[in-house]
Amino acid sequence: MTDDLANQVKVDIENRIIKGVQTYGERLRPNNGRIALQDAYEEVLDLSLYLKQELLEKKNHNQQILNLIDEIINEDKRCLQNDYVIAHCEALTELKQQIEKL
């Protein structure tokens, strides 16, 4: 997408407005009987759950990648001991270390 970030956020906001009208029959307005600070606080709590979920899923995904790299390294070491395989194992070990830093 060639739009800059601000334009992408603008489109997201416009889409949220449309969804709100479809759900509640009107746009968000002041003095609507709700406590905006409480609503915002609850949204932040939801956000914290989504962020933690993403972190755990990313960690799990990274661990799966690390396990596969270990399997490849170990298999390469078992198969052959030549300069190519040694260089390949070193490259995979470097990749693994970079992933572990994420």
Image (tube, rainbow, N blue to C red):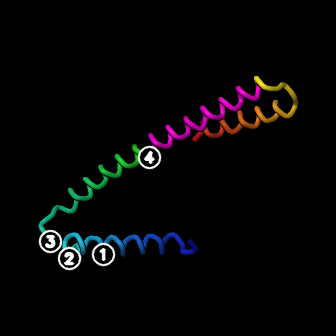
Q: Earlier in the sequence, mark 2 or mark 3?
A: 2
Residue 18 is marked as 1
Q: Earlier in the sequence, mark 2 or mark 4?
A: 2
Q: Nearer the viewer, mark 4 or mark 3?
A: 4
Identify the residue at image location x=61%, y=34%: 66
Identify the residue at image location x=59%, y=38%: 65
Separation (CA) of disc 1 from disc 3: 20 Å
Location of the C terminus by quadrant is top right
Instruction: Identify which amino acid the numbered label 1 is placed on.
Output: Ile
The answer to whether residue 60 is left or right of residue 33 is right
- Judging from the image, what secondary structure is the residue with disc 3 in? loop
Q: Earlier in the sequence, mark 1 or mark 3?
A: 1
Q: Is residue 92 above or below residue 33?
A: above
- Judging from the image, what secondary structure is the residue with disc 2 in? loop
Where is mark 3, residue-wise?
A: 31
Mark 4 residue crowding within 10 angstroms, few (<14) / some (14–19) / many (20+)? few
Of residues 24 and 43, which is closer to you in this image? 24
Q: Is residue 66 above or below residue 31?
A: above
Separation (CA) of disc 2 from disc 4: 32 Å
Identify the residue at image location x=76%, y=29%: 76
Mark 3 residue crowding within 10 angstroms, few (<14) / some (14–19) / many (20+)? few
Q: Earlier in the sequence, mark 2 or mark 1?
A: 1
Residue 4, position as x, y percentages in the image: 54, 73
Residue 26 is marked as 2
Of residues 53 and 40, which is closer to you in this image? 53
Where is mark 4, residue-wise?
A: 54
Separation (CA) of disc 4 from disc 3: 35 Å
- Judging from the image, what secondary structure is the residue with disc 1 in? helix
Residue 76 is marked as none
The answer to whether residue 33 is left or right of residue 37 is left
Instruction: Please give the range of residues in magenta.
Output: 55-77
Q: Is residue 7 above or below residue 64?
A: below
